[in-house]
């Protein structure tokens, strides 16, 4: 199965270069791969061990081929030379120059929290969230908290899938006050579309971290980071209960593609139409951290 997305800058459909494509297809298309996935690959110790290997000096040898195979633009990074990185994870979690990701400044603009391929849904049903066409999950299963889940029924959902080629730090989409994060234990399935089409409730099964973020303009946002195969760690760098501004860093993923999920309460955001239209057509939209992906809803809720 080839994976296509819409490049927002050009409006064109592009074919994704999948890191580890053969390995992923073996895991999900072959009986031997499926057995390895269930017995080994989805386990915490496997991803932890693999992640620790990417912290070793010998892993630097992988960087040049990784950059070449995935066409990564090194001019955006704060360190241009591959030789400036101590190991592979040092490169994978690289920071970018400030000018490489300008933040939309308008108060009513909702900024993308990460680079990645984005799907977005309005007027969501807490009991029928879309993973892929024909495969759903519930907010109760995602939150592991029924009362919290109910608060986002009828609201909006943004799912940003980070490809291994992407910048892997995630940020705040608005100014506000973030609370302490909650870690939810789980497995380490891939979040690539190949896996999403074959494994039910991946987001609810995988390890994830949840932060409730009281934003200035968009109400209370439920901010999830979802781990995946070979994601060594989710690292939070923000300070709980201290004010942040739009675009401030929240944290980063060590090696592996992964996912950020944002849930907004009803009546607080209007997601940009091109993103909604692409989602309805079955395509992710490629976005960069800091660019506008929505705005304040132009109506107020009224009590019934």
Image: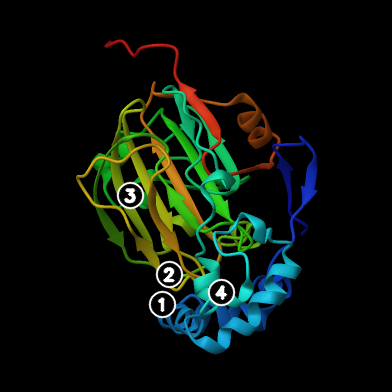
Label 4 crowd bin: few (<14), some (14–19), many (20+), radius 10 Å: few
From the viewer's perspective, is residue 153 above or below residue 167?
A: above
Q: Residue beneath label 4, please?
A: 84
Q: Which residue is mark 2?
A: 187
Q: Residue 17, located in which quarter of the rendered image?
A: bottom right
* Separation of marks 4 and 3 at Cα, in angstroms: 40 Å
**Which residue is painted at 62% across and 61% down in the image?**
198
Is residue 219 visible from the viewing direction of this image? yes
Quadrant assignment, res 222: top left
Dots 4, 2 in contact, CB < 8 A: no
- Estimate the spatial distance between the alpha carbons at disc 2 and disc 1, rounded to whole Å: 7 Å
Contact between labelled residues 4 and 1, with CB atoms less than 8 Å apart? no
Q: Nearer the viewer, residue 267 or 135?
A: 267
258 relative to 296 in the view: left or right: right
Q: Nearer the viewer, residue 233 or 92?
A: 92
| Circle on res. 143 | 3
SS label for mark 2: loop
- Circles 3 and 2, Cβ within 8 Å, touching? The answer is no
Q: Quadrant of the C terminus?
A: top left
């Amino acid at each position: 199965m080839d994976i296509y997305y819409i490049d927002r800058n050009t409006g064109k459909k592009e074919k994704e270069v999948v890191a580890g494509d053969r390995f992923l297809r073996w895991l999900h298309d072959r009986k031997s791969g499926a057995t390895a996935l269930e017995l080994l690959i989805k386990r915490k110790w496997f991803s932890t061990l693999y992640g620790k290997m990417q912290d070793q000096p010998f892993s630097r040898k992988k960087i040049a081929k990784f950059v070449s195979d995935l066409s990564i633009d090194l001019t955006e990074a704060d360190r241009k030379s591959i030789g400036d990185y101590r190991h592979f994870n040092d490169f994978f979690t690289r920071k970018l120059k400030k000018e490489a990701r300008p933040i939309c400044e308008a108060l009513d603009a909702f900024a993308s929290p990460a680079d990645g391929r984005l799907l977005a849904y309005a007027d969501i049903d807490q009991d029928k969230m879309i993973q892929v066409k024909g495969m759903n999950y519930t907010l109760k299963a995602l939150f592991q908290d029924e009362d919290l889940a109910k608060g986002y029924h009828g609201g909006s959902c943004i799912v940003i899938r980070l490809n291994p080629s992407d910048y892997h730090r995630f940020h705040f989409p608005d100014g506000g006050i973030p609370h302490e994060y909650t870690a939810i234990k789980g497995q380490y399935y891939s979040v690539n579309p190949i896996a999403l089409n074959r494994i039910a409730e991946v987001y609810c099964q995988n390890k994830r971290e949840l932060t409730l973020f009281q934003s200035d303009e968009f109400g209370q946002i439920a901010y999830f980071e979802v781990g995946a195969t070979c994601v060594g760690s989710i690292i939070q760098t923000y300070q709980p209960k201290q004010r942040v501004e739009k675009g401030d860093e929240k944290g980063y993923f060590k090696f592996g593609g992964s996912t950020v999920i944002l849930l907004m309460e009803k009546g607080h955001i209007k997601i940009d139409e091109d993103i909604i239209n692409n989602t309805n057509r079955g395509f992710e939209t490629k976005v960069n951290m800091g660019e506008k992906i929505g705005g304040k809803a132009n109506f107020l809720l009224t009590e019934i």
